């Protein structure tokens, strides 16, 4: 009897627990107001302890709800961050790796699934994904980056509507109008109110032109960082306050650049050009006296180089903070409306931004790097009756979690393909993560060779440590955030940290596997390396000129070597055939994928393509043979898509190293075992010619491969001879 009663009590407790835990159990679906800005760094929000500005309305969300201290981006740049949010997936899975990509709006996104769950969905403001929004009952978005003054918005019918006024205010007005008048009030809603502000070029509203006018905003400690103690790639950045602000666009001067040693000249202030005469008058009254004073002092020789950096920092940070003030004003208006309308009680309010930003830290503006200031994203959330006011969370959350969280709040299933996790159980537990919550976040940045010249890198951050990897230089950087919160010295080579480094590297490998990151298939440019950039451009130019190519060689330095030690042999065998060389030294599969989809095939339609690639995936990283084989497969798919009539000779990767059991040679052998299966006997022909370079005992004669990797002239002769019968068979 006692046992039965205990069982019944246990069952009742479990039922109550289930009812509390599940929003499906009859609970009213909450509304979600997701306010989202562009480039708003947490260090410029009062609730995050800002020392440079005040944000009373944003702080209200935190005061009445929670602030997440460890909220991170998966890829710190505008479009990619937004794609991560919509899909709940890392960039390599949602396909939007870099700005300039086009978002595939046919894929699964949380707004579509929320519609299925009965929600009204709306997005108003900045979108920046190149294709029209999908999954929204209502949308009105800025074209591309949009404008601050008198902006145009794309309407759902494809037309443009031009507004007079300030972008942040218009986005707030239109969000309020949708809430008040346009939505179906019978349904729960999610409204994404997405500001352009405070994105570059930091153009404030007239009412805040004079904010901070007579004060000096405190400088960050690392304004004059010299980049020592970390990867040498930091010095290649093009996002420094010292060298990369434009005279017109960023620093808001009119006319000629008087000081080209301190300011870049290319971009004028296009926002000013959009203003009405009245707006311009107010602008000039605020900015021109300061500009004239600066020019006077420069001409009088009163300012040192450091003084100029300091002046530029003040101009930049004040404009940035003025833009944020308008965002804060708008948040205040939205919160007030929720109060007045009675919606506040059942509406979850979230404030976020697509990534953090450098506010002079490391001497920078912009984002992209995995250093704290741009890796962090603000995340403030108010959920009346569930999250206690004033809650502070240190759980490691990431933007891939937002979609799963919204779906969970709506009572919808979270698809298993989404890589993020619902935060709802944590939110219901006063933002304390369960023991099974994540211990580390994975980060990856891909947009090298673009504005600001930040290299491809990825890494892992735990609550205390951060590991970064730079594939171009194959460098690790390790930071102990407790001992070195400003990230000024990598300790990857410090023996004291040997165990930490090994542990972080294991976590890095495991997380990449968990999220299915295979860099061999992710298109990658090496355009941040001058020699590569020039060769790639030359190959594209050459391929565009030719439309009668019969034979194309595609690969890395061994292919490029036909132009070096293989030159005479090339002339002998291919001089009379229309043959093109698409080899670039140092390339891995991912670079060939990039090149073949970014111009290197020009107009050519060769009869035969000879492909050999992968030995650098082995040489650089000893990359897993399955991963490299997937890279080769992707290249074959691209060739099939682009050149359906072309036969492909797929070479087994040539042997390398001194003997049969050389580890790198074995890795190539393992890759070859896999890729030979891609031959179909019709379009793709596998051809292993490695034996031509080997002695019977498996050693390599240095007269054939002087460095045990690249071919001599004799080596090329042997390659050509071994290949020739196959070319003849294929009709050449
Ligand atoms: Ca952004």
Image (cartoon, rainbow, N blue to C red):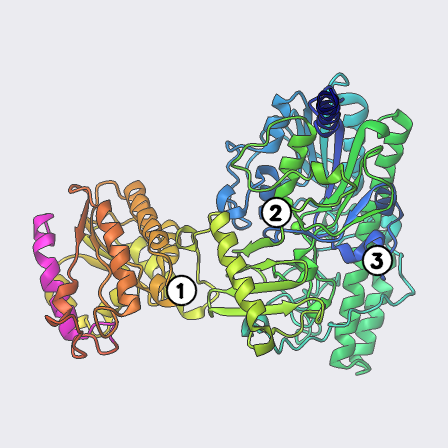
The residue mark sitting in front, 1 or 3, is 1
> Which disc, if any, is residue 49?
3
Instruction: Report crowding for label 3: few under 14, some 14 to 19, many 20 or more residues within 10 A (C-alpha).
Output: few
Q: Are marks 2 and 3 in contact (CB under 8 Å)?
A: no
Is residue 687 rendered magenta in the image? no
Of residues 89 and 222, the one nearer the viewer is: 89
Residue 94 is left or right of residue 270, and the answer is left
Seen at 27% across and 44% down, the residue is 643
Q: Is mark 2 within 8 Å of ligand 1?
A: yes
> Which disc, if any, is residue 621?
1
Task: Please indicate, yes or no, whether residue 576 appears anywhere in the rendered image.
Answer: no
Magenta span: predominant SS is helix
Seen at 52% across and 56% down, the residue is 446
Identify the mark nearer the N-term, 2 or 3.
3
What percent of the width, then of the height, locates residue 180? 82, 24
Residue that mark 2 sits on: 81
- The secondary element bearing badge 1 is classed as helix
- The secondary element bearing badge 3 is classed as loop
What percent of the width, then of the height, locates residue 110? 61, 32
Q: Which residues are magenta?
A: 708-732
Residue 474 is left or right of residue 699, and the answer is right
Identify the mark nearer the N-term, 1 or 3.
3
Identify the mark nearer the N-term, 2 or 1.
2
Is residue 717 rendered magenta in the image? yes
């Amino acid at each position: 009897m006692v046992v039965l009663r205990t069982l019944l009590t246990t069952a009742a407790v479990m039922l109550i627990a289930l009812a509390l835990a599940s929003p499906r159990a009859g609970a009213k679906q909450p509304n979600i107001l997701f306010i989202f800005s562009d480039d708003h760094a947490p260090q410029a929000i009062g609730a995050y302890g800002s020392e440079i500005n005040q944000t009373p309305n944003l702080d209200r969300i935190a005061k009445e709800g929670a602030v997440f201290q460890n909220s991170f981006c998966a890829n710190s740049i505008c479009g990619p961050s937004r794609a991560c949010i919509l899909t709940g997936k890392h960039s390599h899975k949602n396909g939007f790796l870099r700005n300039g990509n086009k978002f595939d709006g046919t894929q699964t996104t949380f707004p579509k699934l929320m519609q299925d769950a009965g929600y009204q969905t709306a997005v108003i403001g900045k979108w920046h994904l190149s294709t029209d929004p999908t999954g929204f009952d209502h949308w009105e978005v800025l074209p591309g980056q949009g404008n601050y003054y008198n902006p145009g918005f794309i309407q759902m019918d494809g037309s443009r509507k031009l507004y007079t006024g300030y972008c942040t205010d218009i986005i707030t007005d239109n969000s309020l109008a949708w809430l008040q008048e346009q939505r179906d009030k019978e349904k729960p809603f999610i409204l994404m109110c997405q500001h352009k502000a405070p994105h570059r070029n930091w153009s404030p509203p007239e009412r805040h032109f004079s904010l901070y006018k007579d004060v000096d905003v405190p400088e960050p400690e690392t304004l004059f960082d010299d980049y020592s103690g970390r990867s040498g790639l930091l010095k290649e950045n093009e996002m420094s306050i010292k060298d990369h602000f434009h005279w017109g666009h960023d620093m808001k001067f009119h006319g000629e650049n008087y000081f080209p040693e301190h300011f870049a000249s290319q971009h004028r202030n296009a926002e000013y050009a959009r203003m009405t005469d009245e707006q311009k008058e107010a602008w000039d009254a605020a900015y021109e006296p300061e500009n004239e004073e600066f020019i006077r002092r420069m001409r009088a020789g009163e300012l040192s180089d450091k003084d100029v950096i300091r002046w530029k920092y003040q101009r930049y940070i004040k404009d940035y903070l003025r833009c944020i003030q308008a965002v804060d004003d708008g948040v205040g208006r939205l919160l007030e409306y929720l109060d007045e309308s009675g919606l506040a009680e059942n509406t979850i309010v979230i404030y976020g931004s697509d990534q953090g930003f450098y506010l002079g830290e490391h001497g920078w503006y912009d984002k992209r790097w995995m250093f704290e200031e741009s890796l962090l994203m603000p995340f403030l959330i108010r959920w009346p009756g569930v999250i206690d006011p004033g809650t502070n969370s240190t759980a490691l959350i990431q933007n891939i979690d937002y979609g799963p969280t919204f779906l969970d709040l709506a009572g919808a299933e979270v698809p298993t393909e989404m890589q993020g996790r619902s935060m709802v159980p944590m939110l219901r537990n006063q933002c304390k993560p369960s023991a099974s919550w994540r211990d580390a976040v994975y980060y990856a940045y891909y947009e090298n060779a673009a504005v600001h010249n930040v290299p491809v890198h990825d890494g892992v951050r735990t609550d205390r440590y951060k590991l970064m990897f730079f594939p171009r230089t194959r460098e690790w950087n390790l930071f102990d955030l407790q001992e070195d919160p400003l990230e000024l010295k990598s300790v990857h080579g410090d023996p004291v940290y040997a165990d930490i480094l090994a542990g972080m590297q294991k976590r890095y490998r495991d997380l990449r596997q968990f999220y299915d990151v295979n860099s061999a298939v992710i298109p990658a440019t090496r355009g941040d390396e001058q020699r590569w950039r020039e060769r790639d451009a030359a190959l594209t130019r050459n391929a565009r000129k030719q439309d009668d190519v019969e034979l194309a060689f595609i690969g890395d330095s061994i292919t490029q070597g036909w132009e070096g030690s293989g030159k005479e042999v090339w002339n002998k065998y291919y001089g009379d055939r229309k043959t093109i060389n698409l080899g670039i030294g140092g390339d891995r599969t991912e670079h060939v994928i990039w090149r073949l989809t970014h111009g290197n095939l020009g107009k050519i339609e060769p009869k035969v393509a000879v492909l050999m690639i992968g030995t650098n995936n082995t040489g650089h990283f000893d990359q897993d043979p399955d991963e490299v084989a997937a890279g080769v497969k992707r290249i074959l798919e691209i060739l099939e898509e682009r050149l359906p009539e072309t036969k492909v000779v797929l070479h087994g990767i040539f042997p390398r190293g001194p003997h049969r059991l050389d580890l790198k040679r074995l890795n190539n052998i393992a890759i070859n075992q896999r890729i030979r299966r891609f031959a179909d006997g019709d379009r793709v022909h596998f051809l292993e010619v490695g034996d031509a370079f080997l002695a019977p005992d498996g050693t390599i004669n240095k007269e054939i491969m002087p460095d045990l990797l690249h071919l001599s002239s004799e080596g090329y002769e042997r390659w050509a001879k071994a290949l020739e019968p196959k070319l003849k068979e294929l009709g050449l």
